[in-house]
Image (spheres, rainbow, N blue to C red):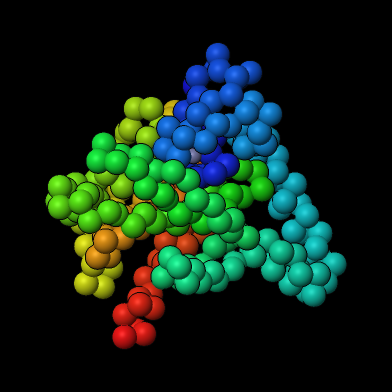
Amino acid sequence: MFYCHCPHCHVCLAIPREMDESPVQCRACRATIPPTSDERKPTSHANHLWLVIVGVALLLVVVGLTGLGYGIWHSYQNPWQISTSKEGEYVVEFPGRPEVTTRPHTHALGSTTIHLQGTTTDDRTQSYTVGYVDLPEEWLKKSSKNEVLNDALIWVTKGHGNVNEKSRKDIWHGKWPGRELATVVGDDGGGLIARAFLVERRIYVVYVSWLYSKDVPDKASRFMDSFQVLRFSVLQK
Ligand SMILES: [Zn+2]
């Protein structure tokens, strides 16, 4: 099995090795990902180690050269960007330039649209994403809050194959109910942290997915904790 991030919704996908030369469909957002997609070539663990070694060597050289040089390098390596979505009514800080996309979202109760904003690291081993769906009134009548939150977390983990759950707990975002899930992805030490929140008719998912590391990425908690729901519609009243 081989793991990569979907270029559209950034969830982690497990792809059987025999599919290496074939297009695959993302099990979460249903986008077709051709075999030539850059996303299907995440840096392997060995290469990643080399990148780290080269990166550290570069850092030492730059620090040795001048403090100013270090400052430039540092700001380049840590391009945190605050992003405010007026339609999505949230603010979040991404560790890179986020891209916005929408995907059809199908569910047993019908279909709607998922709005996504996310970024993947240059080596494609880490992804940071916010998604939201406005749930049709009928769906909410037919599902409990509990089901809606669990459905959102199932969506994020759809591509994993066998989901190896580490923890699942109830959380709150202000007065709005939420749920946090942590899973292990694959045998190479990848993982996922996802939070889902139900804010009136809108469900948000905020997730970090990574490959080839047993450690949660350094940037994960800053990203996850920076997410804030803004209710412009409420403020305007
Ligand atoms: Zn996808």
Q: Position of residue 134 (x, y in %)?
A: 34, 57
Work out whether residue 136 can be spotted: yes
Residue drawn at x 50%, y 24% is 15
Give the side of residue 161 with respect to residue 42, left or right.
Answer: left
Give whichever of 140, 228 is nearer the camera. 140
Image spot of residue 156 (x, y percent)? 38, 43
Q: Residue at x 54, y 52 (%)?
A: 101
Q: Is residue 179 something that shows in the picture?
A: no
Image: 174 above or below 169: below
* Residue located 45% across and 54% down the image: 115
Nearest the camera: 135 or 208?
Answer: 135
* Image quadrant where one finds the C terminus: bottom left
The reply, left or right, for residue 68 in relation to residue 170 is: right
Seen as rendered, the residue at the extreme right is: 65
**Number of marks in the rendered image:** 0
Rendered position, 126 above or below 34: below
Q: Residue 135 in the image: x percent, y percent?
A: 29, 54
- For the residue pair 205 and 190, the one nearer the viewer reads as 205
- In the shown orientation, is residue 101 left or right of residue 175? right
* Occupied quadrant, residue 72: bottom right
Left or right of residue 183: residue 94: right
Residue sitting farthest toward the top: 18
Residue 193 location, x and y as percent? Answer: 38, 49
Query: Residue sitting at 80 percent across and 63 percent down?
Result: 62
- Image: 132 above or below 210: below
